[in-house]
Amino acid sequence: MELHGALVASPGMGHAVPILELGKHLLNHHGFDRVTVFLVTDDVSRSKSLIGKTLMEEDPKFVIRFIPLDVSGQDLSGSLLTKLAEMMRKALPEIKSSVMELEPRPRVFVVDLLGTEVLEVVKELGIMRKHVLVTTSAWFLAFTVYMASLDKQELYKQLSSIGALLIPGCSPVKFERAQDPRKYIRELAESQRIGDEVITADGVFVNTWHSLEQVTIGSFLDPENLGRVMRGVPVYPVGPLVRPAEPGLKHGVLDWLDLQPKESVVYVSFGSGGALTFEQTNELAYGLELTGHRFVWVVRPPAEDDPSASMFDKTKNETEPLDFLPNGFLDRTKDIGLVVRTWAPQEEILAHKSTGGFVTHCGWNSVLESIVNGVPMVAWPLYSEQKMNARMVSGELKIALQINVADGIVKKEVIAEMVKRVMDEEEGKEMRKNVKELKKTAEEALNMTHIPSAYFT
């Protein structure tokens, strides 16, 4: 009987890339005969361009389909979590009909953490095994399922009195200050719903590996800690699920990097969704100029009210003037810097020998890409779980310096200091050593399979 898997990713490259890489892994290492991947998106053409030509080539064993969403009349206010949850809710009928049409009927189903409402739909279709892929850290999974296990009174007490969530068997999730849960009713409701739905799956895959999150993974394996919260649902680390750099790719940024000395360039990007305000964009420009270091900066138009605005921005921006940058900035930095509109080949840039540091929003994809290429970071979180990721890479793993964003605008002097510490000083050398050691463990993890060989048979 043909082993066919159906995988669904919610909007955003941070969800699409790990789902696609997992699909390839199932084909290459777990005996699948066919994998069909559904990508939910509000912009099909943009999604196709970001995925790249190699994945869009026809392959009868690995099929990518898009589920387009019209969000023109949808309320996209609130946090990114509530936006994406609403989008996935709207996509449910199309996901159901698309999976029903597949021949042969899939025996295995996987959806990412923001699409857990789909699990009930595929149960109705009689699919034998249903799974969740956590596209971020095991620590975030711990946060989500443990929060759902608490009653409302206890959860509100922890958030409002101590400003932290004390998770059994792993690090607590701390906030900058005690929170008023009444301000986050929608977010907390969605998070608890997701946590409740995760434990209805037959298994959970996480985009991480043992050496990266040994303590947290250990807690999931411990029936006295998070194992109890999971109620017997197994958790498998399957990372790092990152797109490998494409050998021989031609791009102007890579040509420019070829001319620079080894580990001399700072790469600056806030992901496919991140946006800074006008004032912060200008401070960043002045900060980069102050460092005197070579840099590649992927620039997007400023957004004043929403740090995730670029995720839903339909403008292509490749030809728009960069008049939001400081006067004369491009001229003054033309010999040491390269400013790129909207998009650049991040995997290839991080893999390039000239890249020596990464100023990042700490989306989990970006964190893992930095690790697998041995590049230390300046952690600048913007939204969602990025603050957790930033704390992990700076506090626990010692492979980054974290910028304090709690005080509002990050000034140019602070930006310059952080970049110089990573690129020039002893602590930066120590971080580079640490991340190169983690890179080795990532390579080892890629060559192993963490799902039991007979699991899908």
Image (cartoon, helix red, strand yellow):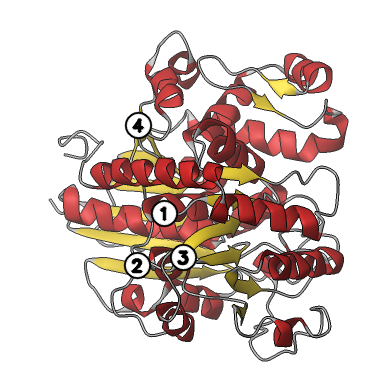
SS label for mark 4: loop
Three-letter amino acid code of the residue under disc 3: Thr
Instruction: Read off the residue under disc 4.
Output: 210
Instruction: Read off the residue under disc 1.
Output: 18
Nearest the camera: 145 or 321? 321
Instruction: Read off the residue under disc 3.
Output: 355
Question: Which is nearer the N-term, disc 2 or disc 4?
Answer: 4
Question: Which is nearer the N-term, disc 1 or disc 4?
Answer: 1
Number of dots carrying numbers: 4
Question: Which is nearer the N-term, disc 1 or disc 3?
Answer: 1
Q: Position of residue 306 (x, y in %)?
A: 79, 59
Residue 18 vs 146, above or below: the answer is below
Three-letter amino acid code of the residue under disc 1: Pro
Nearest the camera: 300 or 188? 300
Nearest the camera: 405 or 67? 405
Nearest the camera: 60 or 276? 276
